[in-house]
Every structure is written in structure tokens, then in C-alpha cells.
Amino acid sequence: MIAKNFISLFEDSFRKHWDLPAMENYEGRAYTFGGMAEEIDCWHSFFAAQGLQRGEKVALMGKDSAEWGIFFLAAITYGAVIVPILQDFPPADAQQIISHSEARILGINAKLWEQMRPELNPALTAVVDFQEGTALYSPEGLEALQRQLQEARAQHQARYPEGMRPEDVSYYHTPNDELLVLNYTSGTTGFSKGVMLSGNNFAGNLVFCMERKIISPGEVLLCFLPMAHVYSCMINLCLAMASGTRVVVLGKVPSPKILGAAFRKVRPTIVISVPLVLEKIYQNTLQPVLKSRKVRFMLALPFLRNIVYRKVRQQLTEGLGGAFRQVIVGGAALNPEVGAFLKRIGFPITVGYGMTECAPLISYIGADEWRLRSCGRVLHPYMEARIAPLEGEHAEGHDATIGEIQVRGENVCMGYYKNPEQTAQLFTEDGWMRTGDLGTMDSDHFLYIRGRSKAMLLGPSGQNIYPEEIEAKIGLLPYVQESLVLMREGKLEALIVPNKQLLQEHGLTLEEGWQQIQAQRAALNAQVGSYEQIQRFELREEPFEKTPKQSIRRYLYK
């Protein structure tokens, strides 16, 4: 058990960093730590007026914003259990989560609430627009609910007529071993489970990161990943607010154009990203240049090679704002070719590994120590990992057996809410948590991911085939947007979605582009083992159906 109470980390930070900038909306309202504390106090008064008890559930669904972060922190510092719901969940799924979690209060954007059916969630006593502070629904009527919202703010002003002071911050310290966050997964297997995360799970993450000074007071983050997902929530909200760090919430779809402008304006000191951002930059911007005759000639000469690498590194750095110390990638595996190139040019990148069930960190290492193809070192002393081996497999280049990664430690969740069967399956008989991921671990406790155990395919001679590794190579072929490798009648095939926008930019029709993609199959097969060779490419014009985390729902495709 972590000695430091999780809620006390925010209490200490708000008092210490009172006048520093805390959270702000990109091109919108900004809050200092003191300003956030005042807004949190207003929500506490509202929760009390609603008769909300410690341990009861408060659901939160909506557009990422500073107000989203304030409402999240208000719930947990009051002593409630927060239920963050990805805004991309279909209304029916969202209402099922609200019902399953037994949420009493819901904070949501008005436009999202318009798609809901109140009669499906009779346990809700209040629905409010957390960003505007307005009433949206109550069984007792909107007027009474709006009055309570106004009275909560009036009570705050009456308590602190001259404004709050740092010493006024005092929160309920939910014990670390109790449920604090109920986060519903958006997995690729078609079943959403409520992961029970305690204060201790988050404290394990935060204490590890704070000890290593991953972010510091006065630094700045650009939050463009969904805050309802535990990866973004832990770093961009919880760690940042506990560390005195300024966070600018993008609140828009992070298209390349929008994201590029935001990086230049905000100039983050740490970049928290998913692999797709860097992979698309590499595929669409860098790869065509690197394959040009002139650049290939320069790369062949050692004295010119470093000049090319330095130029590319500078362009990448400027494209991400130019002020960061390192780029931390998580949420999915980084394409090995992209990772190798970035490592080769000296770009400050590192890859971490985690999952919702660990709130989320399992492994991490700083950019200066990151090893190619790894996802960092297991979070000693807070976490430990082991490999449950698969028969007949050995990791090339690593003196370790391939198997399921199993973990235990401070970050491991309490199980799945109201689901004892799935909880029992999550843990081994001797208490280790099954991640469902296959990989290896070297003698220095660096982890190397091979893929999901449920995605693994069996070759004709019993070989284990990891489709994600082949998909990573397909993803770097010209004009490929995304792909999915599957087994049909004992043969490997790949469903491929062409990048229509890129084809249009290059003046090619879909048919012409598809011919170029098909022509690359031999080159692809030259990069993989004989049992991993793709027998057929199949054109798919529409993108694959994905989870809100943008993982392909593999179970839908046969």
C-alpha cells in the first residue's frame, strides 16, 4: 500500500501552487490552481445539496475541457466514485454504463444529453452540464435543480467573501484501498467491463512519476488524447495537477493541421502521445523524402548522413512545438521501423506500456535509456512482472521466452465491477494479473510486446503468428491507411484500407492506388518469415470499426 494518500496529493498541490496556471481550454477559459479549487468547492456544495454520500457514483461524459477536469477532481475530492465515460460511446452503451455503475449524478454536455432517454436511468437524481453549470434533468424538475446550482455558488461566495485562500483547501481523504474510479474499458473483444480502480492504484502511478520528475511545476502539457481514457486521465489530469503543471486542453479532433498549430502555439515541455501521430508523420512526410534519390545518396555517405539526421530531427522537433524534453508514447505499440528511425537520429522518444486495469502504467523508462522495440522497464519497486511461457516459442534477439505478461503490485486494479466471473479470470491462482498481452522480458526487466493473446493466429505447422507485427509493416507501405491480418482456410490474408486523401493529393484514382499497394506484397513477404507471408490483399474501402480508443474491433472481421 502506498503510504501517501492519493487525494492528499491534490490538496498539497493546490495549496503550494495556488497562483500558478493549472488548466485551460485551447483558445478558451483558463484557471489557476486557486481558481480550480474555488470551482471544486462550488461542486462540493452542490453534491451535498443532492445528498450525495461518500462512495456513491458520479458519472462524467462529455467534450474534453478544463471543466471536465474540474468536475472529475470535484467528485473524487468529495469522496464520491467517478465514472468517466468516453464521449464517443454510442448513447445506448453510455446509458448501460450509467445504469450498471448505479450513478446518482451525471455531468454531461447538453448536446450529448439530447440523445439520451432519461427513463432508462431512473437512479439519476440530477443531470447537469458540467461546462456551463446548468441543469439538464431532474425527476423533481429543472427549476429546483437550477436553483440548487445557483445556491451552491452563493454558499461558496458566502463562505469566502474575499475569495478562498490556500489554507482553505481541505478534502475528504478516501482511504487508498477503497474504490475511487470506475473506468469502463473500450476493448476490441466486444465486451465493456467496469474496471475498479482504487486511490492506491493511481497513487502508485503518481508517486513513481513524481519521484522521477517526469513533469515539473511550471511546465506545460498539450492534452489532445481523450481524458476519459485512463492513460490521458492519469498523466494530463491527475499527475499534472498533483505536480503543479499547466495543461492546455485541445478539445478538438486532433487532425494534423489542428494539432500542428496547437503544438506551435502551446510549445509543450513534454509530449504525451499515441503511436499513430508519429507513425503518420513518418509515413506521409518523412518516408517520401528519405526514399528520394538525393537523400538516399546522402545517407550512404557517413559524413553526410549525420547532416540529414540532424535536419530531420530539427524538423520533427519544430513540428511538435520545439520546446519538449521528451516524447512519451503509450496506448499501443510503436511501429518498430518508426522507432528504429527515431532512435537512429537521436530523437528523444520513449515508449511505455500499461492498461486500464493498472491505472495504467506497468513499464516506463526515460528517453535516454529507452531500448529499441521495448516498452520500458517494469515500474520497480511498485510493480513486478513475469512471463507465463508458451510452448515452443523463443524471442529472437532476447534470452527470454515468449509468453503472457503477468503483473502484480500497487497499480493492479480491484477487479471488475459486479462481475465476479471476469474478475476471477483476470487473476492467476497465485495472485498475478493476466494482461492478455504476449511478450518477453530481458534480464534488466525491460518488456517487449509481441501482441494480444486473443489476436494471435496459429500457423499451418503450429507456429504462433502475431498479426499486429505484420500489420505494422503493411502500415508503412505507400498509400496504406490501415490493415487487418486474418487467417482464412489456413492462409494469411490482409484486409487493407487505402489512404484516399493521399491518393487524391498525388492525383491517383482508387484503382491506380490499389494496384500500387498490391504490387508491394512481394516486398512485404520478403520482410517476414515463410509462415507469416500474406497470400492475398483484399481491398476495403471503408475504415474498420473501432473502439473509442481507435483500436480495431478485430472480432467483427472474419
Image: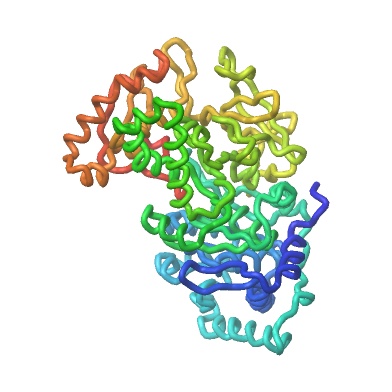
Q: Quadrant of the C terminus?
A: top left
Identify the colour scheme used. Answer: rainbow
The answer, for residue 331, to whether it is visible in the render is yes
What residue is shown at x 64% (from left), y 87% (from top)? 154
Residue 344 position in % (x across, y down): 50, 32
Looking at the image, which residue sits at the far right?
3
The answer, for residue 418, to whether it is visible in the render is no
**Residue 482 picture quarter:** top left
Residue 421 position in % (x across, y down): 63, 38
Residue 52 position in % (x across, y down): 68, 70
In the rendered image, the vertical position of residue 127 relative to residue 374, given as above or below: below
**Most foreground residue, 115 or 239:** 239
Looking at the image, which residue sits at the far top?
461
Q: Is residue 265 left or right of residue 81?
A: left
Q: Is residue 543 left or right of residue 194?
A: left
What residue is shown at x 61% (from left), y 53% (from top)? 235
What residue is shown at x 38% (from left), y 27% (from top)? 486
**Most foreground residue, 103 or 179:** 179
What residue is shown at x 51% (from left), y 39% (from top)? 332
In the rendered image, the vertical position of residue 503 relative to residue 210, given as above or below: above
**Residue 90 picture quarter:** bottom left
Residue 94 position in % (x across, y down): 48, 57
**Residue 423 picture quarter:** top right
Looking at the image, which residue sits at the far front?
303
